[in-house]
Amino acid sequence: MKWRSLEETASQTDARSLREIYTERKELIAKYVPAEVQAIHSRVISELKQSQFADRALQPRNNAPEFELPDHNGKLVRSSELLQLGPLVICFFRGRWCPFCVGQMEAMSAIVPQLQELYASLVAISPQTVHQSYLMADQHKLHFPLLSDAGNKVAQQFGLVYRVPDYQQEIYWGVFVNLPFVNGEDSWGLPIPATYVLDNNHTIIHSDVNPDYTDRPEPTGIVRLLSQLPQ
């Protein structure tokens, strides 16, 4: 489950934009993943878009729920405590098995020093177990908390959860993506990838919710947004 470009090494930091990294991964998928499998993943994305699923998620000016979740070391992290320090950036992602999630998490980790200069905190939330989050943080050298949202309870409060359709479950089983094992439960629920920015009142001041898991916001855009907020 280690997703890196052919030109990278473990000691290097990828300075490319997230769009460039994703373009490379899409090219590799187009080259090596059977067309019929690609078509199934595209079908799920299309169905989620047609259902306007993302429109039901929390939007700017909505109040976000407070949460308390364990990080990849098992330490409880409370949103209320983080927001006492400044704005909070939350990335909902699918899991360490997803190459696009890995790319986003590595890119977000690279901007942690800039976020700290802006007194902002960053957390990422997924349904995977604490152990899976620990493995991901260690393997990809991530410098922010990966929170485990058992049963997608917090993601449900944000309106992000959908059930992986049966026809896609068969594909995941075929490539050894065992979600019941990775997530510690067998609901086959996943969050739509989403990035939120909250102010100290738990009010959402920015959101990016996209059923297309191959398209995520540029970390530099998050930094630019935060730099424009009153200090």
Image: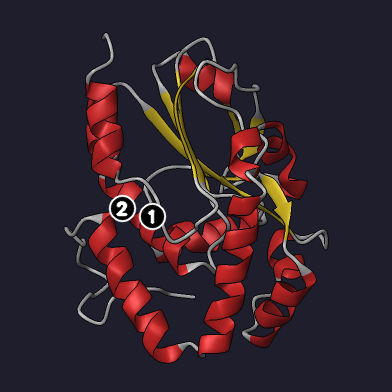
* On screen, residue 213 above or below 72: below
Tally of numbered tags? 2
Q: Amino acid at mark 1?
A: Gln
**Can you see residue 27?**
yes
Counting from the top left corner in percent of width and height, residue 143 is at 37, 47
User: Is the residue under label 1 in contact with that under label 2 (CB below 8 Å)?
Assistant: yes
- Which element type, helix, strand or loop, lies under badge 2? helix
Q: Nearer the viewer, residue 105 or 42?
A: 42
Amino acid at pointer 2: Ala
Vertical arrangement, residue 177 with respect to residue 59, above or below: below
**Relative to residue 173, is residue 209 drawn left or right?**
left
Whether residue 141 appears in this view of the structure is no
Which residue is located at x 75 percent, y 39 percent? 153
- Hey, which quadrant is residue 94 in on the image? bottom right
Identify which residue, 130 or 97, lies in the foreground.
97
Foreground of the two, 159 or 51:
51
Categorize mark 2 by other alpha carbons within 10 Å: few (<14), some (14-19), many (20+). Answer: many
Answer with the quarter of the image where residue 68 lies: top right
Q: Single out the residue that lies furthest toward the right.
A: 186
Is 3 on the left-hand or right-hand side of 56? Answer: left
Report the residue at 35% width, 82% height from top.
Answer: 28
Q: Secondary structure at mark 1?
A: helix
Residue drawn at (46%, 59%), measured in percent from left and top? 101
| CA–CA distance in space, label 2 to label 1 | 5 Å
Whether residue 123 sits left or right of residue 147 in the image: it is left
The numbered dot on residue 141 is none
Residue 84 picture location, percent across and down: 46, 13
Mark 1 nearby-residue class (10 Å; few <14, some 14–19, many ≥20)? many
User: Measured from the top left, where is residue 215 in percent x and y?
Assistant: 40, 55
Residue drawn at the location 55% of the way across and 70% of the way down: 42
Q: Which residue is mark 1?
A: 104
Identify the residue under disc 2. 107
